[in-house]
Amino acid sequence: MASSRTTLTLVGVFLGIFLAALDQTIVATALPRIVAELGGVEKYAWVATSYLLASTVAVPIFGRLADLIPSRTLLFWAIVIFLLGSALSGLAPSMDALVLFRGLQGLGGGALFAVAVTVIGLLIPPRERGRIQGAFGAIFGIASIVGPWLGGLLTDHLSWRWVFYINMPVGAVALGFIARYMPATPPPSRHRFDLAGAIALVLWTVPLLLALSWGGTTYAWTDPIELGLFALAALGLLLFVWVELRVPEPLFDLSLLQNPVFRYASAALFFFGAAFLSAMFFLPLYLIEVKGISATHSGLTLLPLTLGAILGSLGAGTLASRTGRYKAWMLAGNAWLLLNFLAMHRVIALDTPLWLVLLLMVSMGLGLGPSMPLYTLAVQNAVDPARMGTASSATQFFRQIGSTLGTALLGAVLAASLQSAIASHLPPGAKAEGLSLRDPTAIERRFEASLTETLALVERALMGDPEAIEKLRENPIFPEEMKQMLGRPVPPGLKDRILARVKSLLEARIKELQREMKAALDQAIVEAIRRVYLYGAGFVLFGFLFTLLLPDAELKGRAPREA
C-alpha cells in the first residue's frame, strides 16, 4: 500500500498533469477572442501548433533526462517552465509573442508528461501501479471535459488572459506538494546526456509534425513545401538512427526495440493514438450539423465518449492491479473498441436516434479507456529501471505521433469523402453555380452573392444589355417563366414591379435550393463520417494485432489486498 507521503506526492504530480492536459483544450475556446484583440489571424493555428511541436519533442528528451537527474528536481523544473510559459502567454502583447510563449509552455507540458509517468514508475510497484495509471488516464478525460467550459467561462467573464493565469495558483500548490513530500530519489543511472541525439530528434520530428499539421489544409499534400518537409523528416530520421547507433549513451536506446513488450506496446499505441483522435475529432461535425446540437453546447458533444474513456481507464487499471495481469484486459478493450468502430460505421445515418449515438459513444469510450494505462504499465513492468524514463516517454511519443498522423490521414479521408458525396447529392442549380458544401457559412454567403449578382443582371437586361440577357438565360436559379420575357421591351413604369417580382421568385428559389443543399450536406457528412470510422476500425485492428503479439507477464510487486 502506498504510504501517505507517496500519496501526497502523487497529488502534486496529478495536479501538474492536470494543468498540462487542461491547456490542450482550454485555449481553443479563447482563440477567437485572442485573435480579435491581438490580430494576426494568419497565425491562428500556430497557437496550437507551437504547443504541439514543443511538447512532442520534449517528451523523449525529458524522458531520458529522468534517467539521469533526480525526478524531484526534474519535475519541479518542468512545472516551473510550464508556469513561466503560462505567465508569459497571459502577458503576450502580440500573436508572435503568444506563439513563442506557447512553445515554451508546450516544452514544460511535454516535460511534465514524461517525468510524471517516470515518477509513477519509480514510486509505485507494478502490481499497485495499474490503479494509479488508470487515474492518470482519467485525468486527461476530465481535462477534456473541463477545458472548453472553463476556457469559455474565463474568457467571457474575466479575460482570455486568465486562461493562462489560472495555471499559476494550481501550479504553485503542485510545486508545494512535490517540494515537501516527494522523496529525493537518486537517478537510476549516471550517464551523460546525448545532445547530438536530441538535435537529430528535433530535425526529423519538427518537419514531420509540420507536414502532417499543414497537409491538406494550409498546403496540398503534393505542394513542394509539403514534399520538402517530408524529405527533411526522412533525412533527419536517418541521421537520428545513425547517431543513436554510434553514441555510447544514446538519447533513445534502440536496443529497447529488442524487448518484445516495448516493441509491440509502442506499435499498438501508435495505432490507438490514431484511432482515439478519429473518434474524438470528427464526430462533433455529425452531432452539430446533422443532429442539430447547437454550437453553444458543442463543447459537450464529446462528454459521453470522455466519460466512457474515464470509466474504462479506471476500470482496466484496477483490474490489472487486482489480477496481476494486463494482456487479457488489453485484448478485451481492443475487441470491444473494434466492435464499436464497426457499429458506428453501420449505425450512423440521417435518422439515427440521438440517444443511440450517445450510447455508442459511451460504449466506445469504455473500449478506448484501457489503452491509456495498460500499455505504459506493461512497458514499465518489462524494462530495466535505469531506462524507465526513456521507455515510458517513448510510449507517449509514439502515441502522440500516431495521433498527429491519424488526424491528418483521416482528415484527408473526410475531405475526399465529402467531395465525392457532394458531387452525387448536390441539386442541379448548385452544381451549375459551382457551390461547395465544405463550409455551410460559405454556402450562405454564396447564395446571398448569387441573389445580388442576378438582380444586377436583371437591371441590366431591362436596359437592353445583350450580355446580361444571355447570362440570365444560362442562369440556373433565374425563374424559367421570366426567361421568356428577356429581350422584350419593358415600359418604364413596369421596371420596379418586374424587379420586385423577380426578387420574390429568386428568394423562393434560393430557399428551396438551401433546403436541398442542407439535405445534401447532411447526407455527405453521414457518408464521410461512416468512412472515417471504417478507416479508424483499421487502425484499431492493427493495434489489436500488435497486442496479440505482446507477451503477457505477471506484474511485479504485491497487490494491496495481498499485502
Image (cartoon, rainbow, N blue to C red):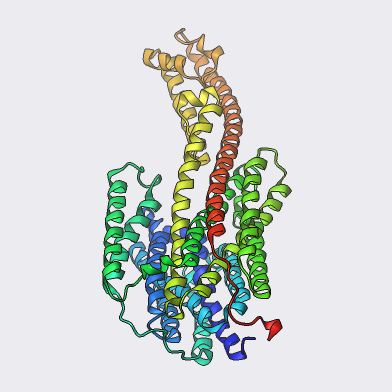
Residue 437 visible in this rendered orientation of the protein? no
Residue 506 visible in this rendered orientation of the protein? yes
Q: Look at the picture and state if 192 lies above or below 32.
A: below
Asked whether 109 or 36 is in front, the reply is: 109
Asked whether 200 or 417 is in front, the reply is: 200
- At a point 42% along the width and 58% down the height, the residue shown is 35
Measured as percent of width and height from the top left, residue 272 is found at 53, 57
Measured as percent of width and height from the top left, residue 40 is found at 36, 56
- At a point 42% along the width and 17% down the height, the residue shown is 471
Q: Residue furthest top?
A: 488
Task: Give the number of callouts.
Answer: 0
- 261 left or right, relative to 93: right
- 288 left or right, relative to 438: right
Q: Look at the picture and state if 44 lies above or below 454.
A: below
Measured as percent of width and height from the top left, residue 474 is found at 45, 16
Of the 4 image quadrants, the one containing the C terminus is: bottom right
Asked whether 546 or 418 is in front, the reply is: 546
- 94 left or right, relative to 235: right
Q: Look at the picture and state if 432 lies above or below 131.
A: above
Of the 4 image quadrants, the one containing the N terminus is: bottom right
Asked whether 335 or 303 is in front, the reply is: 335
Q: Look at the picture and state if 327 lies above or below 229.
A: below
- At a point 62% along the width and 59% down the height, the residue shown is 331
Measured as percent of width and height from the top left, residue 523 is found at 60, 35
